[in-house]
Image (cartoon, rainbow, N blue to C red):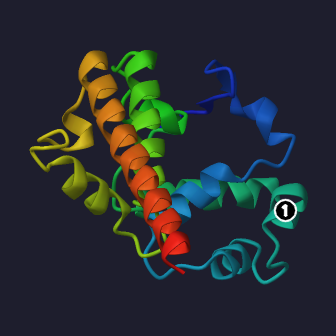
Amino acid sequence: MILKMKFDSNNELIDLEEQKSKGDHSRFYALLKNMVGATKEELVLGASEGQTESLSELWEFYPQQYDELLQAMQQTAGGQTMPYTYKKRYQKRNADLPFEVRKKRSDLLKACAEWGISDNGNGLFWNQINAFLENPKIAGKPIYQMTDEDELQAVIKRVKTMCYNRDKTSDYSAKMKDKIK
């Protein structure tokens, strides 16, 4: 059975039959993700019997074929029934953590970026953050194991102090070089 409900931006369940009138295709794309080798155009062409490649046109002009396509996709996508409910990104992982802890973690990431650890597109950002924080002089554990506000605040203070001292030393070195010239 396909659930015809989802969460809206206020985290309340809404009926998809109402949402359907707006042409929301999120369910189609969620199922398509789980179908290896399938493309949107192929599926839509097959469902519309060669009439269109447009998902919006299929939904608008061939609603019965659109519903049949979604049911067939659900049956073939890994052979499992997938519930059609979505949660916001922030609810997926650390939903059980208090807001204050999540805020402190965010502040810690900002302090680490100030130190020079940032995502430069190579995908190693979390490895770099955790390697930095696992140093016993910094925190001794990765960021996802830090759940105490006071502990996070102490690490933030430590990293910001390191940044301050680095900047202070580099400013002093620059002044000394100017005096020597």
Residue 142 visible here: yes
Establish if 123 lies above or below 81. below
From the viewer's perspective, tell me whether residue 129 is left or right of residue 2: left
- The picture places residue 97, in percent across and down from the top left corner, at 34, 20
Q: Residue at x 49, y 34 (%)?
A: 90
Q: Residue at x 43, y 17 (%)?
A: 100
Say which quarter of the image contains residue 64. bottom right
Establish if 109 lies above or below 105. below
Q: Nearer the viewer, residue 77 or 50?
A: 77
From the viewer's perspective, tell me whether residue 179 is left or right of residue 60: left
- The picture places residue 168, in percent across and down from the top left corner, at 44, 50
Say which quarter of the image contains residue 39. bottom right
Quickly name the residue at label 1: 56
- The picture places residue 48, in percent across and down from the top left corner, at 77, 73
Q: Nearer the viewer, residue 156 or 55?
A: 156
What type is the residue that disc 1 sits on?
Ser
Residue 82 visible here: no
Q: Nearer the viewer, residue 10 or 22?
A: 10
From the viewer's perspective, tell me whether residue 128 is left or right of residue 181: left
Q: Nearer the viewer, residue 113 or 25?
A: 113
Q: Mark 1: which secondary structure?
A: helix
